[in-house]
Image: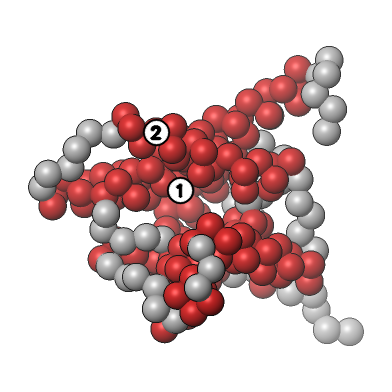
Amino acid sequence: MRLANNPRSWLKFGRLMLGLFIYGLGIALMVHASLGIAPWDVFAQGIQVQTGLSFGISSVIVSVIVLIAWIPLKVKPGIGSILNALLIGIFADVWMPWLPPLNEYWQQMLAFLIGMITVALATGLYISAKLGSGPRDGLMIGTQRITGWPFWIVRTMYEGSVLTIGWLMGGQVREGTLIFAICIGYLMQRSMRMFGMEQKAKPNKPAK
């Protein structure tokens, strides 16, 4: 994608960066709430427990596994895929010092729920830039395109699977993790629809 002398491309790039920046806020809120980590992070933590690798390296391993799964789904990476992997963690670190202390459980739960909704909205925003999905989001979109299943079912299937595997390998699971696994699929489907990115099921071809 060439950005020079192309205002439309710059607008798309700006939408991508804004979506990733807001996504970082959502992640920061959920981490700050201390009520559990997202299912994919439970999976990474399980790999960490079993291998002795750092959490960061374990997260990279998860991303590589997911990107390999893109191949049979025929999902092509873009600049958004790369920036997703590089910037979301940095943006979360930018937001973290600005978050207020959470002294009560209800404050922690509220922060977690707001963070989860923010992640869903930010995902629809940056994917709508059409510059490439993040590793996990591309997996969801590719699977939905192949199967024709509703996005929330695809997302919940993957979130539930990696949550279970990560937990069996020793990853931490708390109430926030379970809430995220159950709700994020539906919230992301609503977000994708809001930004005009929901994939429609393909009609079955009549047998010849």
Could you tell me the amino acid type at mark 1? Answer: Ala
The percent coordinates of residue 116 (x first, y second) are: 37, 50
The percent coordinates of residue 143 (x first, y second) are: 66, 68
**Quadrant, the C terminus:** bottom right
State the SS at label 2: helix
Look at mark 1 in the image and give the residue it sits on.
120
Name which residue lies at 21% across and 52% down: 109
The percent coordinates of residue 104 (x first, y second) are: 10, 47
Which comes sooner in the sequence, label 2 or label 1?
A: 2
Name which residue lies at 49% across and 62% down: 55
Look at mark 2 in the image and give the residue it sits on.
95
State the SS at label 1: helix
* Between 141 and 86, the one nearer to me in the picture: 86
Name which residue lies at 66% across and 69% down: 65
Q: Is residue 75 left or right of residue 187?
A: right
Could you tell me the amino acid type at mark 2? Answer: Trp
Name which residue lies at 63% across and 26% down: 14
Q: Identify the residue at the far right of this view.
A: 208
